[in-house]
Every structure is written in structure tokens, then in C-alpha cells.
Amino acid sequence: MKNSQLFFLALIMIFCTVSTLRGQEAPVEDHSYKPLTLKLNDTGSKYVRFIMWHQFWVTATQNNPGTKDVNGNLIDGTNGSSSWSTDIALRRSRFLAYAQVSPRVLILTHWGINNQSFINGATAPNGPNGTATASNQGKKPQLFLHDAWTEFRVIPTKLYIGAGLLYWNGISRLTSHSTLNFMTLDAPIFNWPNIEGTDQFARQFGIYAKGQLGRLDYRIALNKPFVNGTSPAGIAKNNQATNVFNENYATTGYINYMFWDKESNVLPFYVGSYLGSKKVLNVGAGWYSHADASLVKSAIDSVYQNHTVFGADIFMDMPVNKEKGTAISLLATLYSINYGRNYLRNIGILNEHTTAPVSSTSYSGGGNAQPTIGTGTIGYFQGGYALPKLKNGTSFMPYLTATYKNFKRLKDPSFQWGLGLNYFVTGHNAKITLEFATRPIYKVSGTDIVKDGYKSQITLQTHVFL
């Protein structure tokens, strides 16, 4: 199946939806979003708010070299096979509730599931090379807590202190990004450098402080990362840093200056795009540091090394023409990551397939896996433009993403890009997103890991939240 055929098929689906909606005549109603809130007193200063959302993906993936399906057959374009595979999956299904139980006390609970496909969900794959062996492998995913924390006001607007399972992350704006209002299809994933490693889906246990000092917004935290990795005795002497068991605390923080409109910091979740409802220009910087989180062994030494990340970004989101509903959104981020000598981690989102165990076939692994997080530098840019609203109040927003990665473990840096289109039925509350994205492929050549071209993926997402 060719890229263009898949891309145009998805476009036809979106435009058919638009035509259907435009063709339906109905009385004029107010369809603007009203938060689902339960007042606990007459003034509304005490309240409980509920948020729920689903994100479904339809994907067409051009598989990495050596990829095998669930029956062990190659699906990488060789030996007469097609390199494309398709799937329908649940990217996220969540429920969040928070309550301002008094002017000084807030409590939040957030739970749900992520990344359930026809093969992933029940337990981790446990067959040869990571393939599934149980017939119900994709069923009944684990429901788990994402956030659970309480917060106390110390000085109004200036200082709040809380504790629990936290998403008050440092490093960058993207590291505390909301999943409700991405300007793009999704996050680039490397914005969460500990994802499902020493955190629980981008969360760690900790104590945090937050506040706003005029136009300066800050958040800092002292966290106890989850134990995840390998015991020191089990690490190979391959000169490559590996996550190692330890009980050290981590520090993290992010500070940004708000030049134009101020953003709310009641919750930790940064908005992806305001679609013209705010005029925002922020510059920020942050860090994450976890001592002795990696161990690297070689033939001549054995050294513990820290996990350290520094990030800096600039974010602009503003209306262009309020009457027409046009707006622009831009974000540029730079990461400097040091997780130890030659540290590198491959990740594939909703990746259902494995790869043949041949090092020269694909270093990244099977399906859509790619080098995602490692010691080195990452530059990321995203930009979008909201087009004039249609007569029925809906609108389109095309966008572009670009990523540059330069990891020490790899001989060649990579550049990848994505093109997407949002169709906003009712803003971020109900939207359809189509995205075409590329990713780099690497293979082993002698003692080097070299770039071996690019593969692509097409994703159509339906997103609704209340």
C-alpha cells in the first residue's frame, strides 16, 4: 500500500465528515464547552471538576527491516511481503477529577489506560523475541493511577506546596504538556525522557512547589524515582550505560517568563494551542537530575553515571484575525541529555510487531520503533496555522513538525518531519487529526550504528473530551 493512497483515503474520510456536518440544518445552539463542574457551596469557590477523554488511532505503518507479524512471517517488504501494516487502537482513555475543597486545599486523582491494541494490553509480550503467546494478549488492559496528589496554598499566587504521584515536571513545557489539547497529533515522546523507565507514565512520587512571581512562573520538585533497570551484576561490559537499581532522589524544575497573557497554573498541564483565545509568548528553561541512575561497564572500568537533562524553549500562540478565527502557534525546544556513556533507548508507540534477531537488519527493532532517547542533543520545532472558521463553526489547522537528533551512540544524526491536519468540530473538545510522519532507520555496520534510510507512518485520530 503506497503512502499517497493511504494519505488521500484518510483525507477523503475527513472531508466526507465535513460535508455531512455542513449539510445538516439545525437550530442555532450554543455548542461551546461548559466544564463539568459540581459546586460545593453557593459561590462556587469550592467545587469538584470532572474531565474524561478518549483518543482512538487508525494507523498505517511502514515497518522496519526484519519486522515479523504475530505468526513470525516477515512484513518488511522483502521476499514478496508488504512492508505496510494497519491497526485500530486506543491511544488514551482517561478520567480526571480534582476538587478545591477549601481556598487553601486542592486534591486531584487521574486514572485510565494507554496504548491498547489488538496485541498489547493485558500483559507484556512474553514469547520469543517479545512476541505474544496468550490468545487474550490484547484484552483487558491494566487500569492505573496517573496522578494522585494534594496541594496546600502557602502564599496566594506565589507559593503552593504539594505531594504525591506528580506530573509537576521540569525540563520543558512539553514535559508537562496536557494530552487534551496537543496542537499536533501527539507528543514527540522524547519530551518525557524517563517514560516508563524510572517514572510511571511520566509521573514520579515527590514533593513540589509552584507559583507565579509577577510574570515569572516556576515549578520545582524533589522526587523519588521508581526502581527500574538492571542489577549491577547483570549489566554487560558493552561500554553502554544502562539504567541501574538505586534509591537516590531526583530534582527537577522549570521556570518560564510570560511576556504577554498569563497562563493558569492551577494544574500542571500546559496547553498545546489556545486556538486564538489567548495571546501567549513564553520563554522557559528547566532541568532533571538523578544521581548514579546509570551504570556503564567496559573491559577496563565500571562507572556509575547520573541522569541529567537540560531543556530550553520558546512558545508563541496568538490570534491573527479574531473575527475570522485565524491563529498561529509556534514552539521550539532544545534538549541536552546525558544519561551516561552511549546511553540509547528505542521506542515505538503502539508498536505491535517484533523484528528478526539479526543485528544487521534493524538496530531499532521491529514495527515503528526508532532511537528516541539517548545521550546527546535533540532539537524540536512545531508550527501550525488555524484557518478561517467555516460557517458551521468548525475549522482546520495544518501543522508541521521537525526533529533533529544527534545521539553519541549513533554515527549519524537524523532529521525527521511530520505534516498534519486538525479538523476542529468543537475546538479541542472534539477533533479529528491526520498526520504523516517519518522516522530514521539504523543498522549495525562493523562497530558503528549507521543510518539506513527512513520509514513513515500515517495516523488518523479521533479525539473527544468533556
Image (cartoon, grey):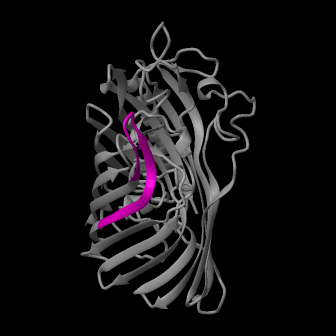
Q: Which of 312 and 384 is in front in this view?
A: 312
Position in image of residue 372 (x %, y %): 40, 41
Residue 336 magenta-highlighted: no
Query: What residue appears at the point 48 percent right and 75 percent down from the top-left corner?
Result: 208
Query: What residue appears at the point 28 percent right and 75 percent down from the top-left corner?
Result: 258
Position in image of residue 19 (x %, y %): 47, 43
Instruction: From the image, give the main secondary structure of the stretch colored magenta.
Output: strand
Position in image of residue 123 (x %, y %): 69, 40
Q: Which of 14 and 170 is in front in this view?
A: 170
Span colored in magenta: 285-305
Q: In which quarter of the image is the C terminus?
A: bottom right
Q: Nearer the viewer, residue 140 or 395?
A: 140
| Farthest front residue in view | 300
The picture quadrant where one finds residue 413 is: top left
Q: In this view, does 122 lie above or below 250?
A: above
Q: Which of 139 and 184 is in front in this view?
A: 139
Q: Is residue 342 above or below residue 41?
A: above
Query: What residue appears at the point 56 percent right and 75 percent down from the top-left corner?
Result: 163
